[in-house]
Amino acid sequence: MKFGNNLRIKTATSWLPPGYETVEDAVTAGKLAASDVERLGLTQLPVSAQWSGPEMAVSAARDAISRAGWSPSKVGLVLHTWIYHQGHDMWSPPHYVANELGTPNALSYAVQQGCNGGAMALQVAATHLAADPGLGAALITTGDRFLPPGFDRWACDYGLGFGDAGSAVLLHHGDAGPDDYALVSMATETAAELELMLRHGDDFSPTPLWHNEYIDLRRPKKSYMAVHGKEKFSEIASRSIRKVIVDSVHDAGLRLDDPRIKYIALPRLGTGLLDGIYMPVLDEVLKAEALWFGAVTGHMGCGDFLANLADLRDQMPLEPGDFALVISGGAAWTWACAVVQVPEERIPEGDV
């Protein structure tokens, strides 16, 4: 999907609660096996003592609007995405985000695509803006709080630790002001047959947490692998990751070895998963440096993709005209890759 230089990411932000739990604490408490520490690659996970997922999303969004210097009235579309309980049942978090921000008349709805939700919401917002020049701007938010008893942040999945956080991105048509990035292109790939991985061996249930006292993704995955083997998923994942990288770079009008592509930001999965699935593909097709920002946040669910845009801006030396890729994946299963560019006319922050 080509966007050229017509859509701009005004800014990206993430909001983390001040509390955290270290890997050492988790091992001591028996929440994490010492043998799992190395393949996670984490030092700690952010833990929210009081803020729900939607509240953290609102905090990230307020920071984004403040950073942009915008009135909330500029936002005509609010998309919110998450993977776990949002604090109420049969309720609409996107409308809460819109109302809290002072944009109650903005079109607001959810985008649900597992941990790839942040990337997919950005793509949906881009299609809205491309189709409606009068829309103004779109806000994409994510927010999750991974608390027991329903969720075990250290043990619910293989090779992941889940951190509480919110994130936000403002996307618009561009104006005379500075922007973090131009959204140049995006590519997505789906392997719907892999949805079976998250329910293998279980009947459809009448209520949540019917099969287990907490969300346990390891159990159906183990059942799936026993029947289908690990190779099937690995082959599909590798092929899909390669495809979204190649397609997004092609749609951006670039070559894979273009020296202006400086970095590719990876999902905040455990380093063992990245080394086993992502890095072999990257080593084959791309010369850009791979970045992982997950050591102190862990996996932020849908928030990895948007938070990576913020950390890429704040932590890495990108110059005007440079490109970067941000890649994401989510069960079960889609992958996405975006090509962003630091605008040539970007105004240094100190001069704004």
Image (cartoon, grey):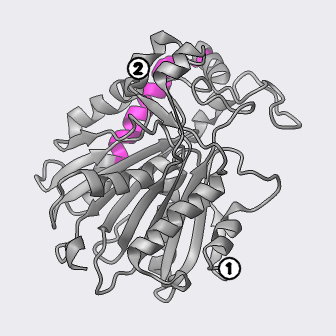
Q: Residue at 54% of width from left, 21% of height from top?
A: 26
Relative to 90, say whether 221 is above or below.
Answer: above
Q: Is residue 111 visible?
A: no
> 311 or 80, which is in the foreground?
311
Relative to 236, say whether 308 is above or below.
Answer: below
Q: Which mark is residue 104?
A: 1
From the image, give the main secondary structure of the stretch colored magenta. helix
> 193 or 172, which is in the foreground?
172
Determine the secondary structure under disc 1: loop
Relative to 30, say whether 106 is above or below.
Answer: below
Q: Residue at 89% of width from left, 37% of height from top?
A: 206
Q: Position of residue 296 (x, y in %)?
A: 41, 36
Relative to 345, say whether 340 is above or below.
Answer: above
Residue furthest left as drawn: 259
Q: Which residues are magenta?
A: 227-244
In the picture, which quadrant includes the N terminus? Answer: bottom left
Q: Position of residue 43 (x, y in %)?
A: 41, 28
> Residue 240 magenta-drawn?
yes
Kind of residue indicated by mark 2: Arg
* Measured Cα–Cα span from mark 2 to mark 1: 44 Å
Q: Which mark is residue 239?
A: none
Q: Which mark is residue 39?
A: 2
> Residue 342 magenta-drawn?
no
Determine the secondary structure under disc 2: helix
Give neighbour class at mark 1: few <14, some 14-19, many 20+ (Cα, 10 Å).
Answer: some
Q: Residue at 67% of width from left, 44% of height from top?
A: 84
Q: Quadrant of residue 111?
A: bottom right
Q: Quadrant of residue 286?
A: top left
Which is more N-terminal, label 1 or label 2?
2
Q: Position of residue 259 (x, y in %)?
A: 10, 52
Q: Position of residue 328 (x, y in %)?
A: 43, 46
Q: Quadrant of residue 192?
A: top right
